[in-house]
Amino acid sequence: MDASFRASMNRAPPLIGHNVVTSDVALTEAITRHGSADLVDDLTLLGVEAGTAEAREHGMLANQHHPELTPYDRYGNRIDEVAFHPSWHWLMERGIGHGLAAAPGESDAPHAHVRRAAGFFARSQTEPGHGCPISMTYAAVPALRADDAIAKEWTPLLASRRYDPGVRARSDKVGALAGMGMTEKQGGSDVRANVTLARPTSEDGFYTLHGHKWFTSAPMNDLFPVLAQTEGGVTCFVVPRVLADGTRNQLDVVRLKDKLGNRSNASSELEFDGTVAQRLGDEGRGVRTIIEMVAATRLDCVLGSASLMRRALAEASWHVSHRSAFGGPLVDKPLMQNVIADPAVESEAATALALRLAAAVDRPGDAHEAALRRIALPLAKFWVCKRTPFMVAEALECPGGNGYAEESGMPLLFRESPLNSIWEGSGNVNALDVLRALTREPEVLEAWITEVGAARGVDHRLDRAIDDTLALLGDVAGLEVGARRLASQMAACLQGSLLVRFGTPEVADAFCASRLGTSFNGTFGTLPGGDLRAIVDRTTPVL
């Protein structure tokens, strides 16, 4: 028998061996725009590592071998240990080592948040689940500043670039990681409905907690900012996994969640019954205390979703550039160019907005940047995270059945794609947060108008979209029912402004025509025209 049929021909080679940072034109442009070209050089090694076959293999293995909970040891002692596959530790060690959990606010380096955001964006393309504990650790530091003594104790460990897993006392560790416990069964996003109780002890500032947390991120970590009820109302506390004397805190892991995606990472239910906790901030001010942590994790939700978009797009564009059908390369087919160019525009817009937000975090003393960050974070969290499943599904379709097979890595991306729209407040929570900011903090609207207004007069479709969005604000009676529409339009105008000012003409025109014009019909691959091949070529990774 002729064995030629066993040969594998006309197949795209694996997308490995490319630099995830430097081969991403939109990312490098944003890093240079908001930071410097030196930052791109600084992230080169991270980009090389993220694109290796080794990194890809570890990402797949970490998701195939899920975390395992051991509640008791062989002697019947409660230990609540979570065991991970070695590939998880490989990913964590390198993510921490690249400074993605280290607190940029503790660094004197310029553009530290932009550098960290770009690294997080690139690194998450290797495997998205390990970004959760890294994100929680990065975000915990600003919340801990509510108490100077607590911040002094924990920040050096949280800002460390050394990965040091294991349940041990703080004094025995060279690096620490943070989780977070806010939501409960009966309340979900309505944390003021929490029923976990905090009872003061004889030691000033210390309490015991009694209750159940429905979702607690990263239960294997070293400390957890949590919310609980005191006589003064909802209050924030720091719960260490191990007490100062080396004994384990009373922190019971009830079970690990069986999730749609994010399987490499452990999410859990916790029970507190006499759990020792230290108050962080004043009684009754828990939401305000923890809000800085929420803001930081929301930024990472935007970055994580933009990262999923980019990885899915890279796989799709790589495939069509190496596959032939119907008489020629797929990438030369006009309709396929449209199918790739349209998600590419989505990805570039998400990347531009995510890095712009990171730049705002780098300038905390600037009133405009602080106000823009306040309004743009929930806008971007709502819009970018909502767009991700739609976009990833389109990218998965490009390789056809090959993309539906687990070995391609695309199903992992698809399962992960809805997560960030739910994490740290679902769509309604963020849309209503936009309304809250607009009604209580008038400076945020001024910041939005200033930001989008910087592109006024360049594209008539953007100008019209800005005017239409401002008109929505005049309908006071319909603001809440129309909150999602308002958030969508405000976010799209921000993206359009960034692309018109800083993007290539092809990308900016395609975005304004499809997202802000009248031609968008609800599916990808329907751009009205333009130089689509230029967008595709700009997007395809280069080895």
Image (cartoon, rainbow, N blue to C red):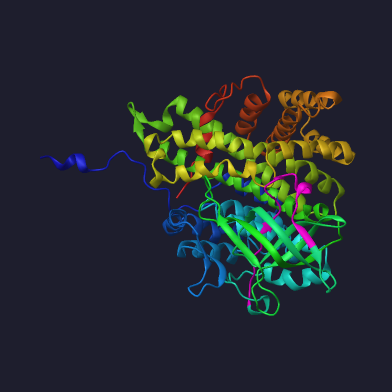
Residue nearest the observer in this picture, 404 or 364: 404
Residue 324 vertical placement versus 528 (above, below): below
Q: Could you say which quadrant of the image residue 131 lies in?
A: bottom right
Q: Residue at x 50, y 33 (%)?
A: 394
Residue 381 vertical placement versus 137 (above, below): above
Q: Residue at x 59, y 61 (%)?
A: 253
Q: Could you say which quadrant of the image residue 432 lies in?
A: top right
On the image, the x and y values in percent for residue 302 come to 65, 45
Instruction: Tell me the magenta residue range.
Output: 173-198
Which image quadrant: the N terminus? top left
Task: Work out whether residue 289 can be spotted.
Answer: yes
Residue nearest the observer in this picture, 19 or 273: 273
Q: In this image, 508 relative to 226: left or right?
A: left
Q: Residue at x 67, y 48 (%)?
A: 185
On the image, the x and y values in percent for residue 112 come to 71, 59
Q: In this image, 26 relative to 312: left or right?
A: right
Task: Work out whether residue 112 can be spotted.
Answer: no
Q: Residue at x 54, y 61 (%)?
A: 45
Q: In this image, 473 relative to 352: left or right?
A: right
Q: Is residue 175 magenta?
A: yes
On the image, the x and y values in percent for residue 536 come to 51, 35
Q: Main structural element of the magenta stretch: helix, strand or loop? A: loop
Outermost residue to the left: 1
On the image, the x and y values in percent for residue 43 come to 59, 59
